[in-house]
């Protein structure tokens, strides 16, 4: 069962790519090093890696290496024997042992002192731990996920981090980009965060606030976004406005130049260019535009020949019609005329069209798509090579 806390929100291409990589590597036993600025979701991703692994039913143990003093961290990780230091009143298992069979998340690994790094390296190599003050070793089977907001290569070059340990930890590397580089996620995240709090039910982000959220640089990344949106929701009676957001931004001096959100049709085209074919539901979800508004703009863009509608059985998808636009220049007028004559005869397939007009099947497909777009033809029958097209009866 996935841990509810590990739901990672994100529509941006980059987040989708990271999640698919994470999903793949989760199923292996490789060590994973997660990097990214503070608040980008490193801890969330670590939990995701555990939840998607075969170790999900075993413990997930997290430790923040920057939050525990160096001398305690060693005892915390490896455990200790009674009497090995003042305060060690009984034997205690360390986190490696507690995480046996599962995942140990070493957060802020970049802040780990060098002597301890050497000890961690040994555990990773030998797969066994020796408690502080003890002589016996114990075998452990632990999958390591480590994270740091620092640049590990830089730490190595500064002599603050062991290169051999970095190699060990970095069986697979995942980098979470800052929120300002994943504009597409900002509004989706803000909405989910707002709607996941029942006490803010009915409160919405105004248009101006959406523009503001997109324009801001988010130095504190997703954590800051959540804090800001929730704090603003406290102050807003219903619609959250810029005046509710501004006092809560971390970067008070930020000169926020609110660039107007692109008009719907430009956003629609940009979305289709970035993602390829999309269903109406996907566009609705990705662009946060009412379906009725989408319908209206899709129709307009189709009429202009900028996008085209693809139908496979009952699945309707939309795509940028750059192919269809180009077709008129590709084909001489006489061929276009021949195509039109051909299409008046009745049902025609791409193959038949290609043969009778003397063009490639691909070109025939593009012409037919163009004619569908122009409302002259309509797809009929199954998809694929044998799909037929019928003239529209007006
Ligand atoms: N993609 C996301 N979807 C949903 N929630 C997210 C996402 N990314 C981050 N969060 C939330 O933002 C907050 C910060 O995330 P997290 O603690 O994982 O960041 P971090 O990179 O570990 O930060 P730090 O370096 O400061 O420890 C958490 O509340 C987390 O749940
Ligand atoms: Mg963290």
Image (tube, helix red, strand yellow):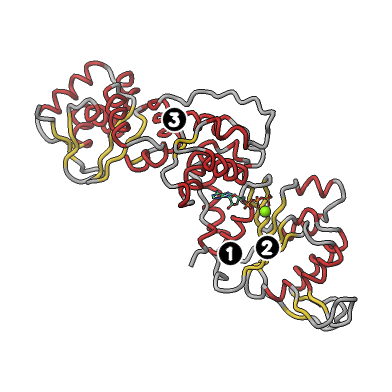
Cα–Cα gap, marks 2 and 1 = 9 Å
Q: Of marks 2 and 3, which one's residue comes earlier in the chain?
A: 2
Mark 2 lies on a secondary structure that is strand
Using a 10 Å C-alpha cutoff, classify the residue at mark 1 as few (fewer than 14 neighbours), some (14 to 19) or many (20 or more): many
Work out whether residue 359 can be spotted. no
Q: Residue at x 69, y 55 (%)?
A: 147
Q: Residue at x 47, y 47 (%)?
A: 200
Left or right of 375 in this view: 144: right
Q: Residue furthest top?
A: 333
Q: Which residue is mark 3?
A: 270
Q: Of marks 2 and 1, which one's residue comes earlier in the chain?
A: 1
Mark 3 lies on a secondary structure that is helix
Percent of width and height locating residue 53: 55, 66
Tag of residue 50: 1
Q: Which residue is mark 2?
A: 105
Percent of width and height locating residue 278: 36, 40
Q: Of marks 3 and 1, which one's residue comes earlier in the chain?
A: 1
């Amino acid at each position: 069962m996935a841990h509810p806390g590990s739901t990672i929100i994100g529509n941006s291409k980059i987040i989708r790519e990271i999640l698919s990589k994470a999903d793949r590597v989760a199923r292996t036993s490789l060590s994973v090093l997660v990097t990214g600025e503070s608040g980008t979701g490193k801890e969330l991703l670590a939990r995701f890696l555990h939840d998607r692994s075969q170790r999900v039913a075993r413990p997930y143990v997290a430790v923040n290496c920057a939050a525990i003093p160096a001398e305690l961290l060693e005892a915390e990780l490896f455990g200790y024997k009674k009497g090995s230091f003042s305060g060690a009143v009984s034997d205690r298992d360390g986190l490696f042992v507690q995480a046996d069979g599962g995942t140990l998340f070493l957060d802020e690994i970049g802040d780990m002192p060098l002597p301890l790094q050497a000890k961690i390296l040994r555990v990773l190599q030998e797969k066994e731990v020796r408690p502080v003050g003890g002589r016996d070793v114990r075998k452990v089977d632990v999958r390591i996920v480590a994270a740091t907001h620092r640049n590990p290569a830089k730490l190595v070059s500064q002599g603050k981090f062991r290169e051999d340990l970095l190699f060990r930890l970095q069986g697979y590397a995942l980098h979470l980009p800052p929120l300002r580089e994943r504009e597409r996620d900002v509004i989706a995240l803000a909405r989910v965060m707002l709607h996941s709090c029942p006490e803010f039910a009915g409160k919405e982000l105004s248009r101006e606030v959406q523009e503001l959220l997109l324009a801001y640089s988010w130095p504190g990344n997703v954590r800051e976004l959540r804090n800001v949106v929730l704090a603003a929701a406290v102050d807003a009676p219903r619609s959250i406005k810029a005046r509710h957001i501004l006092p809560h931004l971390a970067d008070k001096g930020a000169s926020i130049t609110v660039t107007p959100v692109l008009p719907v049709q430009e956003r629609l085209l940009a979305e289709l260019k970035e993602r390829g074919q999309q269903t109406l539901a996907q566009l609705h979800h990705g662009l946060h535009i009412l379906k009725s508004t989408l319908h209206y703009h899709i129709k307009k863009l189709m009429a202009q020949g900028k996008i085209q509608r693809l139908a496979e059985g009952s699945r309707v998808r939309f795509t940028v019609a750059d192919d269809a636009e180009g077709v008129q220049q590709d084909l001489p007028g006489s061929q276009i005329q021949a195509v039109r004559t051909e299409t008046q005869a009745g049902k025609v397939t791409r193959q038949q069209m290609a043969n009778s007009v003397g063009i490639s099947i691909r070109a025939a497909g593009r012409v037919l798509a163009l004619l569908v777009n122009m409302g002259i033809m309509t797809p009929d029958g199954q998809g694929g090579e044998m799909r037929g097209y019928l003239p529209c009866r007006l």
